[in-house]
Structures are given as C-alpha cells and as structure tokens.
Amino acid sequence: MTSQTHGTYNDRHIYVFNLFSGSRESAFVYAISSAGVVFAITRACSQGELKSCSCDPKKKGTSKDSRGIFDWGGCSDNIDYGIRFARAFVDARERRGKDAQALMNLHNSRVGRKAVKRFMTQECKCHGVSGSCTLRTCWLTMGDFRKSGDLLRKKYNGAIQVVMNQDGTGFTVANKRFNKPTSNDLVYFENSPDYCIRDRDAGSIGTAGRVCNQASRGMDSCEVMCCGRGYDTARITKMVKCECKFHWCCAVRCKDCLETVDVNTCKAAKDTGWKEKT
C-alpha cells in the first residue's frame, strides 16, 4: 500500500488493493471484502470448523410461518456471529479514524454485511406418513455468495457520490439532483481515475498488454478492455493434456499435445491522446 497527503484526507488517503481510496471501486472492494468475511466465518461455524461458534443457538423450539407451526431443527447458519466477527475484523482500523475516508469505509462495509444477510432463506423438511407433512423441521441457510456479489455489483453501478457533513457524522450528496444515500447504498467521494491508462499516482496499471476476448461482448471483450485502442493478435503454440483415458484402477493417463491458439492483447497507449503517466 502507498500513502500520500492530499487535501483533508492526510495520511489516510491511501490506496486499497491498488485502487484510489475514495473511488467507487474502493467502495465495492470494502463491501465485497466484508461480505466475504461474513460468508466464510458463518459457513465455518455451521461446518464445525471453529471452536468459538456453532449453529445459531437462537433457532430452537417451535415457531410459526405462513404455512403453520414448525420445529427448528438441523443447523441454522449463525449469520449474527459472522456479522459480529466481520465488524470487529474489517472495521477495526476504520473505527480509530474520524475523517471522511473512515466514515466511507465503515458505511460500505456495513452494506456488504447486509448483502449476505439479505439472502438468508428458510428451508424445511416434512415428516409424516407418505409425505403428509404432519411435522416440519426448518432451519435458516445463507444463499449462494454469487447472489450477494451480483447485488453489490448493482450497487457499485448505482453508487452515490457524497461529501462529509460539517459536523462529521454523516454524508450529503455531492449532486443535489440525487437522493440522500440510504444504509443500503454504496458511497464514494472521488471520481475514479482513468483505468485505461497507466497512472502510478492513481494506482492504475492500465490495460496495455492485457489479454482480451475477441468473441466476448462483456467486460473482457477487446472492445471494452482495450478502451478503443485496438489489439494485437499473436498465434502461439502451447503444450496441453489430450486424449485422456481412465485406467482401472485408478489412474487417468493423458498424452501431451501441441495446440495452436490465437491470443489477443490490448495495444499500448499512443503518444497522441493516450499518453500514460508514469
């Protein structure tokens, strides 16, 4: 990590994971990292991998839902423990800070934790003669982490630029045309640098030389990845495993084959119009 003095951020104006600290990319990184800690710790609790936690101890006895009465059973994911752990682990440094950067990081980390809890679902199993479901046992489980990631990606696209209140306790939107951010919105302070070009001061390594997918229409496509600069195509030959067969018992044996493929890489910035900062 690299720190520098800039405006009112002082020594807290740092690069996080090689990202400009006040940008929307940094907001997403804090959110997804916090969500990942919640998910990993909660799952470890349910699988008995941690001595400090287990299944959710509050999910005991009987309860009621739209289908009627059921018994808590199985192993409900202890999401509250995962959230408490993530809050203590991820937010430890930020809680010592009192500036805008700390406030932003704390806010976005909370958004990430909530993104995991949002997809908690109740699963049930019926008991009785011929599946009559005279008795149900239910438990709570986390959704697939991809759901949380997809949600945070949408929040990244809709992140709100803010400025710190004068009393230092909250945010105000930078553009009055937008609504005040809620506790579920990602927030950021600074516009993102141009990630198309290399700029050490902004923490951007650029996209020159990056491998792109000519057939894709997504973010990995040559059109998007190369930022309109075009790409070079090189034909290379590499060794791959082929004609693999299973032999009883118990081994898979393959031949070594040469494969020729086309590799597309983004062109470097030109001196005119795309001059990079080193």
Image (cartoon, helix red, strand yellow):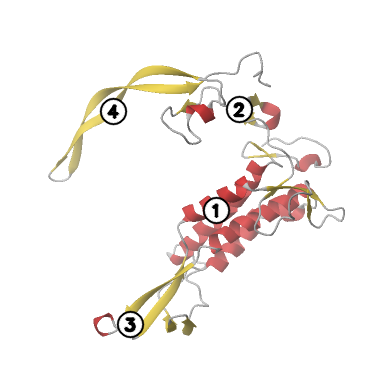
> Which numbered tag is attached to residue 240?
4
Q: N-terminal of the two: label 3 or label 2?
A: 3
> Which numbered tag is attached to residue 151?
1
Q: N-terminal of the two: label 1 or label 4?
A: 1
Please state if 1 lies on the left or on the right of 50 as rendered.
right
In the displayed structure, 81 sits above or below 103; it is: below
Q: Mark 3 is on which residue type?
A: Cys
Q: Nearer the viewer, mark 4 or mark 2?
A: 2
Q: N-terminal of the two: label 2 or label 1?
A: 1
Q: Could you say where residue 193 lies in the image, as x and y percent from the top left?
A: 68, 32
Q: Mark 4 is on which residue type?
A: Val
Q: N-terminal of the two: label 1 or label 3?
A: 3
- Residue at 83% across, 38% down: 7
Query: Is the residue marked by circle 2 packed among few (<14), some (14-19), or many (20+) residues within 10 Å?
Result: many
From this viewpoint, which residue is outermost toward the top?
271
- Dot 3 lies on which element? loop
Front in this rendered view, residue 228 or 9? 228
For the question of whether residue 108 can be seen, the reply is: yes
Residue position for label 2: 196
> Which numbered tag is attached to residue 133?
3
Q: Which of marks 4 and 3 is in front?
A: 3
Q: How far is disc 4 from disc 3 in space, using C-alphas?
A: 53 Å
Query: Is the residue marked by circle 1 packed among few (<14), some (14-19), or many (20+) residues within 10 Å?
Result: some
From this viewpoint, which residue is outermost toward the front?
177
